[in-house]
Image: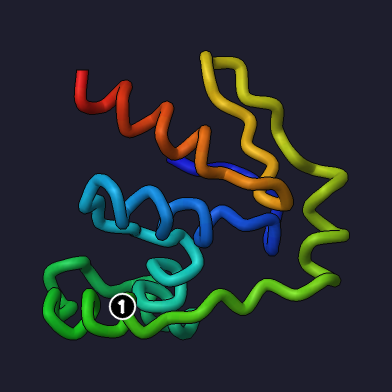
Amino acid sequence: MASGLPGTGKFFFCRKLADKLSFLILASDALRKILFPSPSIRKMKIGDFSLRAMFSSMAQYDAEAKWEVYNKMKTRRERISRNHLVVDTAQDITAVIDRIVRSVEE
């Protein structure tokens, strides 16, 4: 799981990792938009959705988080208490990707 503020490179990092490990990326922004496009849709059950349409829409989704969202959320971020990696996506992420790939393949 990748966690971080909007616009910090989570999706970019996951895409690079998925290129090496063939992971499916489930972005929370995309899921939320598909599952709850309007307040009235929240009353529907998951079985009411077409899974094919849902995954097709997710594949075409582009993150919409703006600077204002980042600024609001940065004061409310939660610390991760479990063992985890911290990745600076402003730097070269190759070494971290390789480390994760080796760990998964072991």
> Residue 61: image x %, image y %?
42, 81
Please rate how many residues cluster around mark 1, counting C-alpha atoms within 10 Å: few if below 14, some from 14 to 19, many from 20.
some
Which image quadrant: the N terminus? top left
> Residue 3: image x %, image y %?
57, 43
Which amino acid, mark 1? Answer: Ala
- Point 78% across, 67% down: residue: 69
Secondary structure of the residue carrying numbered label 1: helix
Q: Quadrant of residue 54?
A: bottom left
- Above or below 23: residue 88: above
Left or right: where 68 falls relative to 94: right
Left or right: where 79 falls relative to 99: right
Q: Quadrant of residue 26?
A: bottom left
- Point 87% across, 60% down: residue: 71
- Point 38% across, 67% down: residue: 31
Q: Which residue is mark 1?
A: 59
Left or right: where 100 falls relative to 70: left
Residue sitting nearer the eye, 93 or 69: 93
Q: How many marks?
A: 1
Q: Quadrant of residue 34?
A: bottom left
